[in-house]
Amino acid sequence: MNNTPQQTGDEKIARNPGLMEYAHTVGGAIIRPDDMGKVKSRSLVAMRQQTDIQLAQLYKQMQLLAEQAKHIGQRVEVSERIYSAQMSFEPLIGNTYYLYEKADGGDALSLVGPQEWGRKKPFKAFIAKVNMLADHTWEIEAI
């Protein structure tokens, strides 16, 4: 067997033209190797932008959760003060009440709002306007 190429022109035909580093025909596209430094730099910038967006979203969620925790803490504090306060009536579900601090440091729950007392207010400070919910917890309407 003879391994020498025949002079039929077969030796000038590319067997795998898609794997060549250059265009194999006159009208072929110019193939230039990518500058890997530029590719990596663009990819790094895109990755940083995406992660910055995700971190900003997480930060907003954390702020919302912190606000919700603060609100729950306020409800617990006010509810504890209400249940240890002086009451001369039984609170009813769905009604609005007013929590005051008395001069002696104790608390009192009242049906009378701060604007309804007139000039002389019998309490040291207004604490909160509250509404009793069906589960006997208190919703704070104003502090």
Image: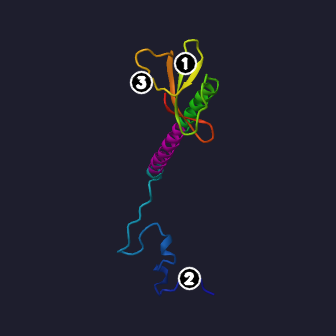
At label 1, the amino acid type is Glu
Kindly indicate whether the residue at mark 3 contacts the one at mark 1 (C-beta within 8 angstroms). no
Nearer to me, 111 or 133: 111
Does residue 60 sit above or below 89 in this rendering?
Answer: below
In the image, which disc is placed on residue 101? 1
- Check disc 3 and report its element: helix, strand or loop: helix
Kindly indicate whether the residue at mark 3 contacts the one at mark 2 (C-beta within 8 angstroms). no
x and y percentages locating residue 6 in the rendered image:
51, 86
Taking the spot 61% from the left edge, 36% from the top edge, the residue there is: 137
Nearer to me, 89 or 73: 89
C-alpha gap between disc 1 and disc 2: 109 Å
* Residue 120 in which image quadrant: top left
- Check disc 1 and report its element: helix, strand or loop: strand
Tell which circle, 1 or 3, labels the residue nearer the N-terminal end.
1
C-alpha gap between disc 2 and disc 3: 111 Å
In the image, which disc is placed on residue 111? none
Point out the frontmost of discs 1 and 3: 3
Which residue matches tag 3? 115
Which residue matches tag 2? 4
Does residue 6 sit above or below 22 in this rendering?
Answer: below
Point out the frontmost of discs 2 and 3: 3
Nearer to me, 32 or 101: 101
